[in-house]
Image (spheres, rainbow, N blue to C red):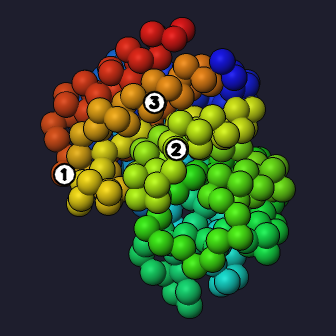
Amino acid sequence: MSQAHLSHSPLSGAGLGLRRSLLPEILQAPPEAIDFYEVAPENWITIGGKMGRYFRELTEKKRFVCHGLSLSLGSADPLDENLVHQIKQFMQTHGIKHYSEHLSYCSHHGHLYDLLPIPFTEEAVHYVAARIRRVQSILERKIAIENVSYYTYAGQEMSEIDFFNAVVREADCHVLLDVNNIYVNSINHGYDALAFLHAMPAERIVYAHIAGHYVQADDFLIDTHGAAIASPVWALLEAAYAHFGALPTLLERDFNLPPLNELVTEVEKIHAAQKAVA
């Protein structure tokens, strides 16, 4: 077992991505199984009124992590430093200790509203790592970078895992390990998911993501976050725990939201897998 060193992680156990529609129900009867929540700060920075009070009440009771959607780390557009400063203030207001982002880009002279892959090249390694270091300098903390799902790529001088590891090493940042993205990419691009998983830098992992996907064809999966977690993804999560230890793990569900009790059942399944290797 290659245990991840999680002393730098403010998280433990199992978490849930927080949607506004769930907030009143969660506050009324807080699920004991949920140890932490994740929010996209872009969707919550300007929240006010009753929902703002609800949100503040929950951040005072539970641990939170911010998961960014729009920094566009791989874009040729200038880094949105104003947004980074807003995120910093948001984290300070709510006592949030950690921020994660995608190793991708989502803007070109304006937002594209999709997470697009960065070319796997040495030039891109240096460019993106410098932008990550700038974000870390403004936030005054290391951030975690997520391995992303993708369906094509613009250039490939190295493998996906070599590119990912080169970026996080040069940026000296943490890692958000997305288990579903590894599985989806392994099917779509024909590589060994377990080998990719084992090549992730254990000492940098802060937490993990797990989510559902859509099966378009036997060899084409779409990362949707809109379905229950598939059996092969559960198996890969268990393999991650066997290799890294019981990583803090967050359930992502962005649409087709089932009742809260069904989400809690999946969170409890994460707990069961963690306890199996504890």
Residue at 19 percent across and 31 percent down: it is 262
Q: Which comes sooner in the sequence, label 1 or label 2? A: 2
User: In front of the other: label 3 or label 2?
Assistant: 2
Residue 244: horizontal and vertical position, in percent?
62, 24
**Which mark identifies residue 256?**
1
Residue 246: horizontal and vertical position, in percent?
55, 20
Q: Is residue 156 left or right of residue 250?
A: right
Report which residue position mark 2 lands on. 192
Gap in angstroms between the C-alphas marked 3 and 1? 23 Å
Whether residue 133 is visible here, answered yes or no, is yes
Q: Is residue 203 above or below residue 19?
A: above
- Amino acid type at circle 3 is Leu
Q: Quadrant of the C terminus?
A: top right
Report which residue position mark 3 lands on. 237
Gap in angstroms between the C-alphas marked 3 and 2? 15 Å
Q: Quadrant of the N terminus?
A: top right
- Element assignment for label 3: helix
Q: Residue furthest bottom?
A: 109
Q: Which comes sooner in the sequence, label 3 or label 1? A: 3
- Amino acid type at circle 2 is Asp
